[in-house]
Image (cartoon, rainbow, N blue to C red):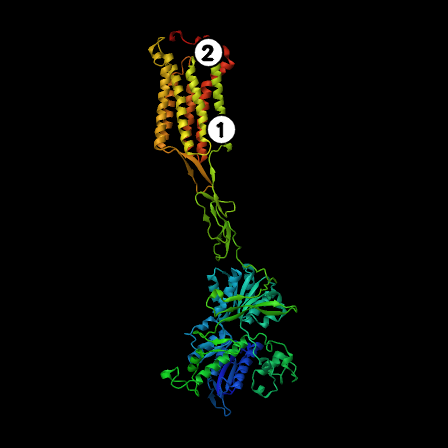
Amino acid sequence: MIPNTMPVLEKKGDIILGGLFSLHDMVEEQSLPFTSQPPKSKCTRFNFRTFRWMQTMIFAIEEINKEGRLLPNITVGYKIYDSCSTPHQALKAAMELMGGEKSSEAGEKTCNESVPLVIGDGGSTQSLVVARFLGVFTVPQISYFSSCACLSDKKQFPAFLRTMPSDFFQVNALVQLIKHFGWTWVGVIAGDDAYGRDGANIFASEVTKLGVCVAFHRIIPKNRHQEEILSIISVIRLSGAKVILVFAVEQDAAALFDEVQRSELTGIQWLASEAWSTAAVLSTPKRYHHILQGTVGFAIQQANIPGLRDFLLRLNPSRSEAQTDPFLVSFWEEVFQCSLGAQTESQEKEGENKPPCSGKEDLGNVTNIYSDVSQLRISYNVYKAVYAAAHALKALKSCVKGEGPFFQRSCADPDVIQPWQLLYYLKQVQYLNSFASEIKFDENGDPAAMYDLVNWQMNPNGEIEFINIGKFDGKTGDVKQKLYIHEEIIFWNGNRTRVPSSVCSTVCPPGTRKAMRPNFPVCCYDCVACTAGEISNLSDTIECAKCPPDFWSNAERTACVPKRVEFLSFRDTMGITLVAISFIGSFSTCLVVLIFFCNRTTPIVKANNSALSFLLLFSLTLCFLCSLTFIGQPSKWSCMLRHTAFGISFVLCISCILGKTLVVLVAFNAKLPGSNVIKCFGPSQQKAIIAICTIIQVLICTVWLLIAPPAPRQLMPREEDFIILLCDEGSYIAFALVLSYIGLLAVLCLFLAFLARKLPDSFNEARLITFSMLIFCAVWIAFIPAYISSPGKYATVTEVFAILASSYGLLGCIFAPKCYLILLRPDKNTRKHLMSKAPSSRF
């Protein structure tokens, strides 16, 4: 054999099937020399599980040959190579299967016979390289463990098929699992290979469509450098994610969990991809139990293959067929930690001084991954791959001439099988095996996806068991109905009922909304209380809803309640105060009336025109009482009454004062006693003036009420929690006329009183009227801007205050001095005293 020729396990037959298995987990290359010969490589770290897969292929082939039903009178042989879990070793093995060189006994170099079909390889990274190479020759390849979704691309890999479901289906299963438990903040850790990277990328893309956020996405380096893995641990701690998917092969997952265990990182719900969801490498050492208990993952379907265990235990180096098995020695020495034959030079250099094997070793006495047939999952895939190839060969051999699928309905030559013809029949394979599983490939060369949902649970002996708690059926049409969970899951916290929570932010309760954090994923947000006037009655609301104009939010911001109605009420402190002031003013006016009536014959009452004084006091009483119409809930009648009562009562009051002013002014300016001028302003004329002035105001108010009367109106500020009830003036022009008319009479009265201010003090009240009119005008001039700027009910308060202030001003300035003289200085309430200061020429 030429240098660097790869070891091969082969058996002759009419039809030879190729096989690729990663019997070692890694390969060591020698330094590259600048010679014509390629460097030699060495595979290390024997894999018992993969060796069992290889033996399963041999078992299936021998079962087919023994039974003879599928391929009568035809024997199937095999050529199996070790790909050492590396792409370049897998490619070298594939080249050997396609007719690599070999040396004859005479030293001549010849070509190996190529195989029409290859079963393998296991890893997706190796299969990618092999599939590209075999695709050039259209040699069908059936992988039993390559799940990368990229291999479904028939443009790149036209001859690739597999009995392992695509990662696309596994990702769907994982997404449904995450959706089922309501996890929205999930971390993703992937292996640095085609399987890990592609699977994790598809998962991140699909899970994002459901509104789930990927907390982080990290890669386990192939060199397993401790600092890089520790950085992953640090990211896990900082993210706060409690659910983490590890999409990697078992060797990469083991490197990660070694650091997790050393870092004492606990409290994580691990999700396993199918590559390590039932890995004995992780479940057997008890050091991982406290961190991996409760792990949930999907595993491909398992089956119990009758007779396989006995077939596996048949191996023994002393058997004759073992002499042609180049892998048996490494397997035997690794299982029993002994040495078959003399120590090799490399073993001596490495210090591996293993004791010699006794020859009495029995595989049945050893419990390891190889002999454990309780979880036959990948082995079952190998078994199905061999039988799929056998069914394709049967269909090819059974073709009837003239009814074939090829050019001019021809059949394939059964003696010289062309790989592309065998590939055609493989794509048509569809049968129900002895385990009631339907075997067929879709248009992408993928099988129907069927997964078991497994949960890592601790048994009473302190050992991890893989418990089937559900399944994912990829054959159903509706994606939402694919996941079935028929048993309770034990989570990392050892609890069956309390599902771990993994969210970046807690659920926003009703009354709040989500406020996204800048530069964070959409799952990270703050809960902000709805503003006043807005509500949210559901959890995790993005926006708060505004209440209708006449409603407002309650204190919890969860419901809209009617706005409180606000008006100047008799129950308000302000309303009660104004009512008290109004009644005090009315009572004071009535008290003055009583004083004047009891002293109506005294000179001071007679001198100040008692008739007009009583009419003025009556009008002042009306002014005080009309303020009460502004208090209370506005209605149609109260709105009309308050403005008309106010306008008419004040005009009556000012008219009386105007009449008194005219009498004083005319009386003291007449040159002769008994003058006709005085007669023109007698009692009848005074009453006429008062009546005319009042009737004008009555007419203005009547027209106002007929055309555009005041009416109640609601003011609903959007940013306030109350509705203001007030009286709308109806016609602002009419309201302005009423005020202007009152102001005109007040200004006229002030002007006349000002002219009479220097007349004898004892005979006239001009000065008192002047002061009262000044107060009156000042109050109402200040009222206008205050009324316009006052909000809500305070505009009404301003108007009532102006009414009461001006009424008190008139009552106090005009009648307080007279009551003082009547009650406290009766000595001055005499005709002599009143006439003493009057000039004689004026009378």
Tell me what residue is drawn at x 51 percent, y 14 percent. 824
Task: Say which quadrant the C terminus sits in.
Answer: top left
Q: Tag 1: residue type?
A: Val
The image quadrant of residue 395 is bottom left
Q: Are marks 2 and 1 in contact (CB under 8 Å)?
A: no
> In this figure, what is the number of numbered marks?
2
Tell me what residue is drawn at x 35 percent, y 24 percent. 696
* SS category of the residue bearing label 2: loop
Up-down relation of residue 681 to residue 122 (above or below) = above
Dot label at residue 249: none
Tell me what residue is drawn at x 51 percent, y 32 percent. 573
Near-viewer residue (506 or 450): 450
Residue farthest along the front direction in this orientation: 637
Distance between the alpha carbons at the discs numbered 2 and 1: 35 Å
Residue farthest along the left direction in this orientation: 676
Q: Residue 514: horizontal and vertical position, in percent?
A: 49, 52
**Residue 326 visible to the viewer:** yes
Q: Residue 774: horizontal and vertical position, in percent?
A: 42, 22
* SS category of the residue bearing label 1: helix
Q: Is residue 693 left or right of residue 364?
A: left
Q: Earlier in the sequence, mark 2 or mark 1?
A: 1
* Neighbourhood count class around disc 1 (C-alpha, 10 Å): few under 14, some 14–19, many 20 upward: some
Q: Tag 2: residue type?
A: Thr
Q: Residue 591: horizontal and vertical position, in percent?
A: 49, 19
**Residue 83 visible to the viewer:** no
Residue under label 2: 601
Dot label at residue 579: 1
